[in-house]
Amino acid sequence: EVQLVESGGGLVQAGGSLRLSCAASGFTFGDYTIGWFRQTPGKEREGVSCISTSDGSRYYADSVKGRFTISSDNAKNTVYLQMNSMKPEDTAVYYCAAVRGVLVIYADEYDYWGQGTQVTVSS
Protein backbone atom coordinates (compact mmCIF):
# COMPACT_ATOMS: atom_id res chain seq x y z
CA GLU A 1 0.00 0.00 0.00
CA VAL A 2 1.38 3.39 -1.01
CA GLN A 3 1.57 5.89 1.80
CA LEU A 4 2.80 9.46 1.99
CA VAL A 5 2.76 10.96 5.46
CA GLU A 6 3.47 14.63 6.01
CA SER A 7 4.62 16.07 9.31
CA GLY A 8 6.15 19.24 10.66
CA GLY A 9 3.38 21.73 10.10
CA GLY A 10 2.35 24.24 12.72
CA LEU A 11 2.14 27.87 13.66
CA VAL A 12 5.09 30.20 13.10
CA GLN A 13 5.61 33.94 13.11
CA ALA A 14 6.47 35.82 9.95
CA GLY A 15 10.18 35.55 9.30
CA GLY A 16 10.39 32.20 11.05
CA SER A 17 11.12 28.71 9.78
CA LEU A 18 9.51 25.29 9.60
CA ARG A 19 10.66 22.00 8.15
CA LEU A 20 8.11 19.68 6.62
CA SER A 21 8.78 15.98 6.17
CA CYS A 22 7.17 13.55 3.76
CA ALA A 23 7.74 9.90 4.63
CA ALA A 24 7.01 7.54 1.75
CA SER A 25 6.37 3.81 1.64
CA GLY A 26 4.88 1.21 -0.67
CA PHE A 27 6.75 2.10 -3.85
CA THR A 28 10.30 2.27 -5.20
CA PHE A 29 11.26 5.65 -3.82
CA GLY A 30 14.20 6.24 -6.15
CA ASP A 31 11.99 5.98 -9.25
CA TYR A 32 9.76 8.86 -8.29
CA THR A 33 9.54 12.62 -8.23
CA ILE A 34 8.20 13.96 -4.95
CA GLY A 35 6.41 17.27 -4.96
CA TRP A 36 5.13 19.70 -2.37
CA PHE A 37 1.87 21.49 -3.02
CA ARG A 38 -0.19 23.89 -0.97
CA GLN A 39 -3.81 24.90 -0.95
CA THR A 40 -5.94 27.52 0.75
CA PRO A 41 -9.74 27.55 0.81
CA GLY A 42 -11.26 28.58 -2.48
CA LYS A 43 -7.99 28.40 -4.39
CA GLU A 44 -6.45 25.81 -6.65
CA ARG A 45 -3.67 23.61 -5.38
CA GLU A 46 -0.34 25.34 -6.04
CA GLY A 47 2.88 23.54 -6.85
CA VAL A 48 5.59 24.74 -4.48
CA SER A 49 8.59 22.54 -5.17
CA CYS A 50 9.56 19.10 -6.38
CA ILE A 51 12.61 16.88 -6.48
CA SER A 52 13.65 13.92 -8.53
CA THR A 53 14.83 11.27 -6.11
CA SER A 54 16.86 9.63 -8.87
CA ASP A 55 19.07 12.54 -9.91
CA GLY A 56 18.34 15.25 -7.35
CA SER A 57 17.07 17.82 -9.84
CA ARG A 58 14.77 20.36 -8.25
CA TYR A 59 12.14 22.89 -9.12
CA TYR A 60 10.86 25.84 -7.10
CA ALA A 61 7.92 28.10 -7.71
CA ASP A 62 8.89 31.76 -8.02
CA SER A 63 6.92 32.54 -4.87
CA VAL A 64 9.27 30.43 -2.71
CA LYS A 65 12.56 30.58 -4.60
CA GLY A 66 15.39 31.59 -2.30
CA ARG A 67 13.34 30.88 0.84
CA PHE A 68 12.41 27.19 0.59
CA THR A 69 14.74 24.27 0.07
CA ILE A 70 13.69 20.77 -0.90
CA SER A 71 15.88 17.78 -0.16
CA SER A 72 15.68 14.02 -0.21
CA ASP A 73 17.08 11.33 2.06
CA ASN A 74 16.75 8.21 -0.06
CA ALA A 75 17.98 5.98 2.76
CA LYS A 76 14.97 7.06 4.80
CA ASN A 77 12.50 7.37 1.89
CA THR A 78 11.82 10.89 3.07
CA VAL A 79 11.66 14.28 1.40
CA TYR A 80 11.99 17.51 3.34
CA LEU A 81 10.87 21.05 2.68
CA GLN A 82 12.82 23.59 4.68
CA MET A 83 10.86 26.83 4.79
CA ASN A 84 12.68 29.97 5.87
CA SER A 85 11.76 33.66 5.94
CA MET A 86 8.17 32.64 6.00
CA LYS A 87 5.38 35.03 5.08
CA PRO A 88 1.68 35.12 5.99
CA GLU A 89 0.91 34.25 2.37
CA ASP A 90 2.66 30.90 2.92
CA THR A 91 -0.27 29.90 5.14
CA ALA A 92 -1.92 26.83 3.62
CA VAL A 93 -2.38 23.11 3.90
CA TYR A 94 0.77 21.54 2.49
CA TYR A 95 0.62 18.22 0.70
CA CYS A 96 3.32 15.97 -0.60
CA ALA A 97 2.71 13.83 -3.65
CA ALA A 98 4.54 11.32 -5.80
CA VAL A 99 4.73 10.70 -9.52
CA ARG A 100 6.84 8.11 -11.30
CA GLY A 101 9.61 9.48 -13.47
CA VAL A 102 10.26 12.98 -14.68
CA LEU A 103 10.32 16.25 -12.76
CA VAL A 104 6.88 17.84 -13.04
CA ILE A 105 4.98 20.32 -10.90
CA TYR A 106 1.47 19.94 -12.27
CA ALA A 107 -0.82 18.46 -9.62
CA ASP A 108 -2.84 16.50 -12.17
CA GLU A 109 0.27 14.50 -13.09
CA TYR A 110 0.75 13.11 -9.57
CA ASP A 111 -0.45 9.64 -8.65
CA TYR A 112 -0.21 9.52 -4.88
CA TRP A 113 -1.00 12.10 -2.23
CA GLY A 114 -0.56 12.54 1.48
CA GLN A 115 -3.22 13.78 3.83
CA GLY A 116 -1.76 17.26 4.24
CA THR A 117 -0.37 19.29 7.11
CA GLN A 118 -1.48 22.76 8.13
CA VAL A 119 1.04 25.59 8.08
CA THR A 120 0.02 28.93 9.55
CA VAL A 121 2.22 32.03 9.46
CA SER A 122 1.14 34.86 11.70
CA SER A 123 1.98 38.47 10.91
Image (tube, rainbow, N blue to C red):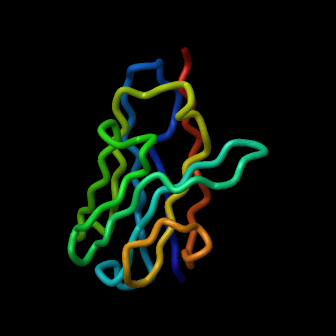
User: Compared with residue 36, is residue 100 higher up or lower down, i.e. above or below?
Assistant: below
* Quarter occupied by residue 123: top right
Q: Which quarter shows the N terminus?
A: bottom right
User: Compared with residue 77, is residue 84 higher up or lower down, i.e. above or below?
Assistant: above
Q: At which x and y percent is residue 119? A: 55, 36
At 48% from the left and 24% from the top, the residue drawn is 12
Q: At which x and y percent is residue 78? A: 33, 63
Q: At which x and y percent is residue 90? A: 53, 34
Taking depth in this image into account, of 40 and 5 the one nearest to the observer is 40
Residue 8 as seen in the image, left or right of residue 30 = right
Residue 29 as seen in the image, left or right of residue 8 = left
* Quarter occupied by residue 104: bottom left
Q: At which x and y percent is residue 89? A: 56, 30
At 39% from the left and 62% from the top, the residue drawn is 50
Residue 67 as seen in the image, left or right of residue 47 = left
At 47% from the left and 78% from the top, the residue drawn is 99
